[in-house]
């Protein structure tokens, strides 16, 4: 069942991208869409191998661009850069600490839309930008900062439930058992 | 091994991003549609869930509420019938005058109803997804509106779904005319992708101090994308810009873009 947690990660990304296109009244009230893909990429970068992280970036990035008016492929570089940087330094990151997860989520939630906007600004037509963009960045950072530890908790439980359990070896050997009695 | 895997991942993403970003628009559109197809089951489930919630809410309505709603609709129906009669008379007169001047007769609008199934997932564009596509005869650049006014134009068409660029999107320029003063103007792109405020800015081609708050803004028909005389909104306030050379005005949109559920696509 090793493949199941990774499959569920892709499933969560599929649902998260779709959820970004729904809940219009909530998004309208908050003034920004509910994008949690950066938090999922941070989680994948810290807990999975680079192939899974890259696969998630390719899938989620292409999915976001296909449901959006974005130029196809423009979401890939920012998502991959964030995921790669976290993955390359994963041995230095205290990934079990909640504050580290929160700060990584905040950083990713801020960097991904900023990177995407920078790339979009290089081609025509330029995307909409203004003061509200700053709010989008702040909101995205806060949302992903909150979601990142939640991803660790939820997927950690799933991994515990479905991953192979370590074999516990005992020093007990039946052939060395001292048998008392007459026989 | 680890470094090799890292190099392989960087190379894969770099090559793929470069290839995809440089695809011709038609091919990129087809790839987008293929990826968007992955979400069709979720769009279907969301649609069914919405209709279930609607039906459940109808079942909860009281009899007195329904009766008062029927009364209101009867009154509105009578008003609309009267307005339609007047409009028919005006249209007949218009057709006679056009015929006497030798002008081509105005073709009536054909429309196709569509349901809004998705919104833009990013903050960079004003965009919605509707549940009609090429199979329903939808083409790029067709006008999209509600009973209240203009919504936008078709940006991309898939077999069963289409994307609509809303008013205020950088990809949806609208040429308009102020009904009272007959000044031509252009709706500019919004400064925010948040569509909750419902305002856009228009800019006239020359300074027009006659434009006042409350004036009606209609499509001018220039550019060939939008038919003439579709209501866009009303002027809220104006100011002189570019050292008095032009006038800029805030327009409150007639259609509430934040609460779009059903729209009409104008087909030829």
Image (tube, helix red, strand yellow):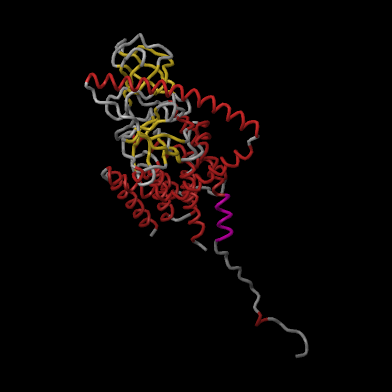
As rendered, which of B226 and A144 lies closer to the eye?
A: B226
Could you tell me if residue A100 is visible in this image?
Answer: no
Q: Where does the image place residue A115, in percent across and percent down from the top left?
A: 38, 38
Of the 4 image quadrants, the one containing the C terminus of chain B is: top left
Q: Please tell me whether the stretch drawn in magenta is mainly helix, strand or loop.
A: helix
B80 vs B61: above or below: above
Residue that appears at 41% across and 16% down: B235
A75 vs A154: above or below: above
Residue A52 located left or right of residue A179: left
Residues in magenta, as a range: A153-162
Residue that appears at 37% across and 11% down: B211
Confirm whether the magenta stretch covers residue A155: yes
Q: Where does the image place residue B105, in percent across and percent down from the top left?
A: 27, 26
Confirm whether the magenta stretch covers residue B8: no
Could you tell me if residue A16 is visible in this image?
Answer: yes
Residue B55 located left or right of residue A88: right
A148 vs A131: above or below: below
């Amino acid at each position: 069942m090793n493949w199941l947690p990774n499959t569920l990660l892709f499933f969560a990304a599929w649902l998260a991208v779709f959820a970004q296109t729904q809940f219009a009244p909530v998004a309208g009230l908050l003034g920004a869409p509910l994008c949690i893909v950066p938090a999922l990429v941070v989680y994948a970068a810290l807990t999975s191998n680079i192939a899974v992280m890259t696969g998630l970036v390719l899938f989620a990035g292409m999915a976001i661009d296909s449901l959006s008016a974005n130029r196809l492929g423009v979401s890939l570089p920012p998502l991959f850069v964030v995921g790669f940087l976290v993955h390359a330094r994963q041995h230095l990151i205290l990934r079990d600490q909640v504050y580290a997860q929160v700060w990584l989520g905040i950083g990713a939630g801020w960097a991904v839309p900023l990177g995407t906007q920078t790339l979009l600004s290089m081609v025509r037509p330029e995307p909409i930008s203004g003061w509200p963009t700053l709010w989008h960045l702040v909101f995205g950072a806060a949302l992903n900062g909150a979601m990142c530890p939640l991803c660790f908790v939820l997927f950690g439980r799933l991994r515990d439930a479905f991953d192979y359990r370590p074999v516990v070896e005992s020093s007990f050997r039946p052939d060395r058992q001292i048998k008392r009695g007459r026989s | 091994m680890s470094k090799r895997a890292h190099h392989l991942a960087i190379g894969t993403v770099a090559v793929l991003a470069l290839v995809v970003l440089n695809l011709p628009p038609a091919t990129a559109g087809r790839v987008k549609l293929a990826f968007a197809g992955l979400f069709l089951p979720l769009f279907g489930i969301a649609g069914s869930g919405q209709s279930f919630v609607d039906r459940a809410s109808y079942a909860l309505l009281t009899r007195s509420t329904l009766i008062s709603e029927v009364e209101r609709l009867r009154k509105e129906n009578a008003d609309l019938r009267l307005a339609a009669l007047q409009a028919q008379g005006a249209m007949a007169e218009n057709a006679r005058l056009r015929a006497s001047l030798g002008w081509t007769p105005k073709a009536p609008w054909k429309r196709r109803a569509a349901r809004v199934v998705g919104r833009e997932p990013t903050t960079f564009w004003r965009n919605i997804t509707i549940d009609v596509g090429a199979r329903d005869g939808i083409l790029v650049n067709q006008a999209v509106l509600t009973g209240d006014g203009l919504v936008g134009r078709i940006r991309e068409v898939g077999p069963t779904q289409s994307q609509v660029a809303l008013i205020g999107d950088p990809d949806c320029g609208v040429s308009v005319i102020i009904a009272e003063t007959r000044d031509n103007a252009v709706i500019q792109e919004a400064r925010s992708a948040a569509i909750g405020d419902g305002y856009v800015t228009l800019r006239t081609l020359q300074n027009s101090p006659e434009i006042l708050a409350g004036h009606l803004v209609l499509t001018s028909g220039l550019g060939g994308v939008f038919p003439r005389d579709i209501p866009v909104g009303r002027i809220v306030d104006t100011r002189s810009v570019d050292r008095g050379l032009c006038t800029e005005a805030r327009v409150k949109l007639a259609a509430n873009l934040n609460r779009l559920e059903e729209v009409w696509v104008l087909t030829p």
